[in-house]
């Protein structure tokens, strides 16, 4: 099987590359920049002509949520125009290939309707409309709406990483009050969800764009995450972590829609407590290596 991973330098993309390479698949890693859109499409089309893949995983894209014109252009190119262009070229050169993109739980409101939290979420919803179009034209397509992913080698500015770093380094961390809820899913479980989705797409006839949620079903508040990481650290409290300093963001979520289906046959396997403990151990090791851990 030949797999193309777009966005291989990101957290998800890098894990996809490592996984499929370790599984013995022929993996082609591609990176994308909006200002080099035409160059990327030419290289991608050449790859399709030379070695048509069985799967394309679009794991990259802009994650900015601002509404200024420059950001919106970047979001539109990376998250809407690019996946639509990929689908168009697949229809021409590799119509049997499966195309999987990754969306966000922030596309959906607490009651389940389309309610994009920010411009990033809006761009992911727009991309799904194009993929529905290309599925009707004969492609096998799916979107995995990710909840809050975490795991090793994560450089993103995510709250779970910020808390773990503050505990590892005893650095100051002002926060909001922490009542908003998230659903943490380990990156290993995202990989198995991808495999389950690819298996389904290969077995089903084309014509329907599939949308699945990659969620554990266990929602926790930010304060719950703090408590779990404190427990993993063997601490009752950490005075350097200060909830209640910042106000909540506009349209903050205090409930998550629970009914978007998950990939058939898939269930998360990494317990949250185990994943958070491993994350804290990694962050402590990083702090020691950088000389940032307190003596």
Image (cartoon, rainbow, N blue to C red):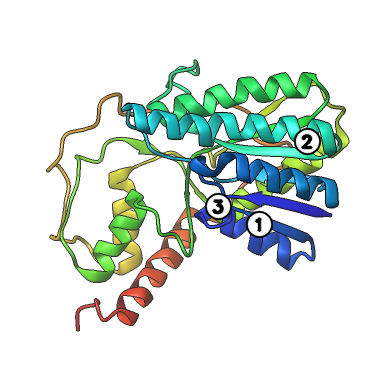
| Label 2 SS | helix
Q: Which residue is mark 2?
A: 90
Residue at the spot 45% in from the left edge and 67% down from the top edge = 278
Pointers 3 and 1 in contact (CB under 8 A)? no
Q: Nearer the viewer, mark 3 or mark 1?
A: 1
Of 131 and 218, the residue lying toward us: 131
Q: Nearer the viewer, mark 3 or mark 2?
A: 2
Q: Percent from the top left, x then y, of residue 123?
A: 49, 27
Q: Which residue is mark 1?
A: 29
Instruction: Name the image quarter holding the C terminus.
Output: bottom left
Of 291 and 179, the residue lying toward us: 291
Residue at the spot 66% in from the left edge and 41% down from the top edge = 41
Q: Percent from the top left, x then y, of residue 19?
A: 67, 61
- Determine the CA span between mark 3 and mark 2: 22 Å
Q: Is residue 121 visible?
A: yes
Of the numbered discs 1 and 2, the one sitting upstream in the chain is 1
Give residue 155's quadrant in the image.
bottom left
- Determine the CA span between mark 1 and mark 2: 16 Å
Badge 1 density bin: few <14, some 14–19, many ≥20, Cα 10 Å: some
Residue at the spot 31% in from the left edge and 80% down from the top edge = 288
Instruction: Name the image quarter holding the N terminus.
Output: bottom right
Residue at the spot 72% in from the left edge and 32% down from the top edge = 87
Of the numbered discs 3 and 1, the one sitting upstream in the chain is 3
Of the numbered discs 3 and 2, the one sitting upstream in the chain is 3
| Label 3 SS | helix
Badge 3 density bin: few <14, some 14–19, many ≥20, Cα 10 Å: many
Q: Percent from the top left, x then y, of residue 118?
A: 37, 27
Q: Which residue is mark 3?
A: 12
Q: Is residue 292 left or right of residue 71?
A: left
Q: Is residue 86 left or right of residue 109?
A: right
């Amino acid at each position: 099987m030949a797999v193309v991973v777009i966005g291989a330098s990101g957290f998800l993309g890098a894990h996809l590359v490592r996984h499929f390479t370790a599984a013995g698949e022929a993996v082609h890693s591609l990176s994308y920049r909006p200002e080099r859109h035409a160059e990327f499409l030419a290289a991608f089309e050449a790859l399709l002509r030379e070695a048509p893949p069985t799967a394309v995983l679009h794991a990259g894209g802009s994650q900015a949520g601002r509404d200024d014109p420059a950001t919106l252009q970047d979001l539109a190119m990376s998250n809407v125009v690019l996946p639509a262009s990929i689908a168009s070229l697949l229809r021409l050169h590799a119509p049997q290939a499966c195309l999987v993109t990754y969306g966000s739980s922030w596309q959906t409101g607490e009651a389940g309707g389309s309610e994009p939290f920010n411009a990033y979420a809006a761009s992911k919803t727009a991309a799904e409309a194009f993929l529905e179009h290309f599925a009707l034209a004969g492609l096998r397509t799916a979107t995995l709406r990710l909840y809050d992913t975490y795991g090793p080698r994560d450089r993103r500015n995510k709250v779970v990483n910020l808390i773990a770093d503050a505990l590892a380094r005893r650095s100051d961390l002002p926060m909001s009050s922490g009542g908003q809820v998230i659903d943490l899913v380990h990156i290993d479980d995202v990989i198995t969800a991808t495999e389950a989705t690819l298996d389904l797409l290969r077995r089903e006839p084309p014509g329907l764009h599939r949308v699945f949620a990659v969620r554990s079903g266990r929602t926790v508040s930010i304060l719950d995450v703090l408590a779990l990481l404190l427990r993993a650290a063997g601490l009752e409290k950490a005075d350097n972590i200060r909830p209640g300093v910042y106000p909540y963001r506009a349209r903050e979520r205090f409930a998550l829609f629970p009914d978007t289906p998950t990939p058939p046959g898939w269930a998360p396997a990494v317990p949250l407590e185990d994943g958070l403990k491993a994350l804290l151990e990694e962050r402590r090791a990083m702090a020691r290596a950088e000389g940032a851990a307190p003596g």
